[in-house]
C-alpha cells in the first residue's frame, strides 16, 4: 500500500468517525411516517424515513392510477412490517378513494393503512363516511380525540381514517379518525419530550377540568395545572377559571419521568399563575382600609374571601355575628361584605375583619367631624357647642331661687 493509499484510508476512517451515528429506530406496524423518496425501481420505491435502512414501498401496494413519485418527493406511507432496526421497514401507501373496493379495505384493515374518505352525513351515534364509493361508519367516539358535540359540522370534510373492521362482505365497515390522530399525537409527543425542559413557556389546549386542576395538552404530551397554580389568590373551583377547549399559556414547573420510560406517561407539572401578574395590592391592602370581599367558601372556623387585595380568611371572631353563631347559616359563596385587613397568619394567609369595619367608619366620621370645627380649642366642639349654648340660654336665671319640691 502506497503512502497515498494510506493517507486516503486514514481520511476515510476519519470521515466515517465524524459522521452521524447509525440510526437504530424501530417503527411499529401501523405507524404513519413521512419520508423522502431516494430511489425508484421497477418493483419498489425506496424512502428515507429516518431508520438505518430505507423503507421499501412495493409498487404493487400503490393504489391503481396513482402517480409514481420521483426522487426527492416527500410522501406519506404506513409501516406494515419492521422486525428489527437493521432491516428495512416495509411500507404501504395511504389509500385514496380511487380504485378502492372491499378487498382493498380488508388489506388496509390488516396492515393499518390509512384510507381517505369524506364525512357524508350525520346519523345516529356517529357519521356516515364515503370511502371510495364504499359506505362506512365512524362512531362519534372515533371522530376526535376528545368529546365531539355537533357532528353536523364535519359533514363534507375529507380526512384519512383507519379501517377497524370489514364485515358482511363490505356491508359493515367501521373506520376511525381518532386512531390516526392518536398515532400522530404520540409521534409529536416523542419529539416534544426530547426538547421539553423545566422553565419552558408554551401554549396548550385544556383537555379536561377536575376539582384538583386542569389537564392541558401540550401537543402530544399532557401536563397538569394544579388548582393552586391556575391563578393568583384562592380558586374555589378550576371550572370558574378554565373550560375544556380553552387555549392557555403555561410554564413547565417540573418533569417526572415515568418508570416505563414512555414520554406519554411522564408527569408534567404546569403553572398558569407563573405567567400572569398578581393583582394590585396583593400584599393585603392598606391597614384600616375598607374593601369589598366576595365569599368563596364557608367553613366552620370562618369564611374564605376574595378581594382586590388578595384572598384570605375572616375568622369567626372577626365576623359581625352574635357569639356562637354558625357562619354557614349567615353566609353563602358569592355573598359580598365589607372587611378591613388586620394582618397575616403563620402561613402567610391574609386575615380580614368584618367586625372592625364599624370601628373604622366611626373613626373616619370622628376625624371628619373634628376637621370641620377648625384648629382652635374653643372651636373643637364646633356646632355641638353652639347647640348646647343655645339650650342653656333658655334655662331660668340661676339667681332666681327654685321652687321647693312638692311633698307627696
Image (tube, rainbow, N blue to C red):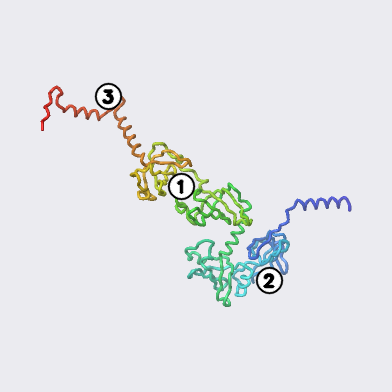
The answer to whether any part of residue 99 appears in the image is: no
Residue 403, x across and y down, in percent: 11, 27
Residue 11, x across and y down, in percent: 81, 51
* C-alpha gap between disc 1 and disc 2: 63 Å
* C-alpha gap between disc 2 and disc 3: 113 Å
Tell which of 144 and 281 is nearer to you. Answer: 281
* C-alpha gap between disc 1 and disc 3: 53 Å
Q: Nearer the viewer, mark 2 or mark 3?
A: 3
Reading the image, the residue beneath label 3 is 378
Tell which of 10 and 156 is nearer to you. Answer: 10
Q: Are marks 2 and 3 in contact (CB under 8 Å)?
A: no
Measured along the vertical axis of the image, is residue 59 above or below residue 399?
below
Reading the image, the residue beneath label 1 is 234
Q: Which mark is residue 124?
A: none
Tell which of 5 and 342 is nearer to you. Answer: 342
Q: Is residue 386 left or right of residue 8?
A: left
Q: Residue at x 12, y 29 (%)?
A: 405
Q: Are marks 1 and 3 in contact (CB under 8 Å)?
A: no
Tell me the element at label 2.
helix
Measured along the vertical axis of the image, is residue 166 above or below residue 402?
below
Task: Locate the C terminus by quadrant.
Answer: top left
Q: Quadrant of residue 55?
A: bottom right
The answer to whether any part of residue 51 appears in the image is: yes
Mark sitting earlier along the chain (2/3): 2
Neighbourhood count class around disc 1 (C-alpha, 10 Å): few under 14, some 14–19, many 20 upward: some
Mark sitting earlier along the chain (1/2): 2
Q: Which mark is residue 60?
A: 2
Mark sitting earlier along the chain (1/3): 1
Amino acid at each position: 500500500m502506497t503512502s497515498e493509499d494510506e493517507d486516503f484510508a486514514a481520511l476515510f476512517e476519519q470521515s466515517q468517525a465524524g459522521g452521524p451515528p447509525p440510526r437504530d429506530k424501530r417503527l411499529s406496524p401501523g405507524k404513519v411516517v413521512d419520508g423522502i423518496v431516494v430511489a425508484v425501481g421497477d418493483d419498489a420505491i425506496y424512502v428515507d424515513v429516518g431508520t438505518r435502512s430505507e423503507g421499501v414501498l412495493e409498487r404493487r401496494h400503490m393504489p391503481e392510477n396513482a402517480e409514481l413519485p420521483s426522487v426527492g418527493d416527500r410522501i406519506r406511507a404506513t409501516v406494515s412490517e419492521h422486525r428489527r432496526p437493521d432491516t428495512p421497514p416495509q411500507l404501504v401507501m395511504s389509500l385514496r378513494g380511487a380504485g378502492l373496493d372491499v378487498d382493498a379495505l380488508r388489506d388496509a384493515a390488516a396492515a393499518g393503512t390509512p384510507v381517505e374518505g369524506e364525512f357524508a352525513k350525520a346519523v345516529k351515534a356517529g357519521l356516515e363516511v364515503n370511502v371510495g364509493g364504499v359506505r362506512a361508519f365512524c362512531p362519534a367516539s372515533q371522530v376526535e380525540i376528545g368529546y365531539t358535540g355537533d357532528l353536523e359540522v364535519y359533514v363534507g370534510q375529507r380526512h384519512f381514517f383507519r379501517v377497524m373492521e370489514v364485515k358482511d362482505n363490505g356491508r359493515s365497515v367501521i373506520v376511525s379518525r381518532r386512531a390516526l390522530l392518536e398515532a400522530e399525537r404520540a409521534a409529536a409527543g416523542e419529539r416534544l419530550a426530547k426538547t421539553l425542559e423545566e422553565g419552558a413557556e408554551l401554549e396548550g389546549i385544556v383537555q379536561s377540568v377536575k376539582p384538583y386542576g386542569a389537564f392541558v395538552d401540550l401537543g402530544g404530551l399532557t401536563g397538569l395545572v394544579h388548582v393552586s397554580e391556575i391563578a393568583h389568590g384562592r380558586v374555589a373551583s378550576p371550572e370558574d377559571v378554565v373550560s375544556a377547549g380553552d387555549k392557555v399559556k403555561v410554564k413547565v414547573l417540573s418533569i417526572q419521568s415515568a418508570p416505563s420510560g414512555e414520554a406519554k406517561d411522564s408527569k408534567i407539572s404546569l403553572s398558569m399563575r407563573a405567567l400572569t401578574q398578581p393583582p394590585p395590592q396583593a400584599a393585603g391592602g392598606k391597614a384600616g382600609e375598607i374593601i369589598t370581599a366576595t365569599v368563596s367558601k364557608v367553613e366552620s372556623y370562618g369564611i374564605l374571601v376574595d378581594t382586590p387585595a388578595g384572598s384570605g380568611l375572616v375568622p369567626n371572631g372577626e365576623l359581625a355575628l352574635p357569639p356562637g353563631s354558625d357562619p354557614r347559616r349567615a353566609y353563602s359563596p358569592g355573598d359580598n361584605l365589607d372587611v378591613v385587613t388586620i394582618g397575616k397568619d403563620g402561613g402567610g394567609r391574609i386575615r380580614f375583619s368584618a367586625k372592625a369595619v364599624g370601628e373604622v367608619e366611626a373613626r373616619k366620621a370622628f376625624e371628619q367631624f373634628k376637621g370641620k370645627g377648625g384648629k382652635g380649642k374653643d372651636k373643637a366642639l364646633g356646632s355641638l357647642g353652639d347647640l348646647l349654648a343655645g339650650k342653656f340660654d333658655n334655662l331660668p336665671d340661676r339667681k332666681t331661687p327654685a321652687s321647693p319640691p312638692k311633698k307627696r
